[in-house]
Amino acid sequence: MISVLRFLGSLRVGVALLLAIFGLVFWGTLFEARAGVELGTERFFDSWIFFAAGIFPLPALKTLAIFLFVNLLCALLFRIPRTKKNVGIWILHFSLLILIAGSFLSHASRENFDAFGFVGASLPLDEKAKNSLRLLNADSMKVCALNGAGDSIFIAANSPQTIGDYQIYFAETIPMNAEKTIVRLHIRRDPFDFVPKLFALIFCAGIFLQCIFCRGKNENF
């Protein structure tokens, strides 16, 4: 059993998985350019398997990410020595584990939906947290609103605003008549959106520590 776990955590398996992920991303990007981002994401990156040529089942990004997680975990437990000079390597592997686990948690808890509100009326976002917007005026490019604190904010298509746990994007205005206009907003909530930043911080710390220990080792010679 230990030999199997050592093999799963081997550098050879890790390199093979990274090459497979690189090939999948390259293939998926070419597919997205031809068939569209949504279809490419659904087929290659947001699924467990996909069928090449409609016949041959191949692992998609979710499956490869699970395999990579197992490889990194087994490498930490059974392959990489627990010595001072390997602290940076341990931190680098740990950061990748956080990124993979956080990506799955983010996917499971993420919310995306559209909200509609009348100009001049309030638009509730979360009744428990009492997050809401009061839509003051809008045109085809942006909407002016008051947040829960009474501050005036502008929400444009390329300039989202954050209220509580929600990121709010302007989508469109829908005129009903001379007096009523509906604003459509796209709402996104991701409680694990901090994971990429945490990963980057820990990853950089690992590189820094590894460089320090490698330099110290070289100076001893």
Image (cartoon, rainbow, N blue to C red):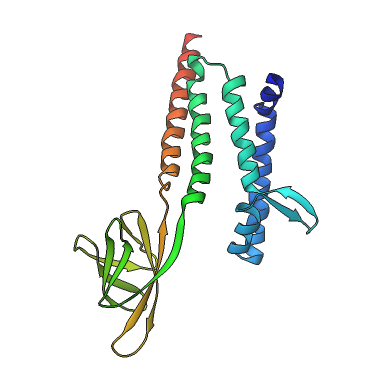
- Which residue lies most toward the bottom here? 178
- Which residue lies most toward the top here? 221
Q: Does residue 65 appear to the left or right of 103 in the view shown?
A: right
Residue 78 coordinates in the image, percent (x, y): 61, 20
Q: Residue at x 35, y 53 (%)?
A: 165
Residue 153 coordinates in the image, percent (x, y): 25, 65
Q: Quadrant of the N terminus?
A: top right
When asked about the image quadrant of residue 51, the answer is: bottom right
When asked about the image quadrant of residue 8, the answer is: top right
Residue 101 coordinates in the image, percent (x, y): 52, 40
Q: Does residue 108 appear to the left or right of 13 in the view shown?
A: left
Task: Decide which of 41, 27 is in the foreground and name it.
Answer: 41
Q: Is residue 194 above or below residue 46?
A: above
Q: Residue at x 45, y 15 (%)?
A: 216
Task: Decide which of 139, 148 is in the foreground and name it.
Answer: 148
Q: Residue at x 66, y 34 (%)?
A: 15
Q: Is residue 135 above or below residue 202?
A: below
Q: Which residue is drawn at 37% across and 58% down?
A: 167
Residue 132 coordinates in the image, percent (x, y): 28, 64
- Which residue lies most toward the front here? 128
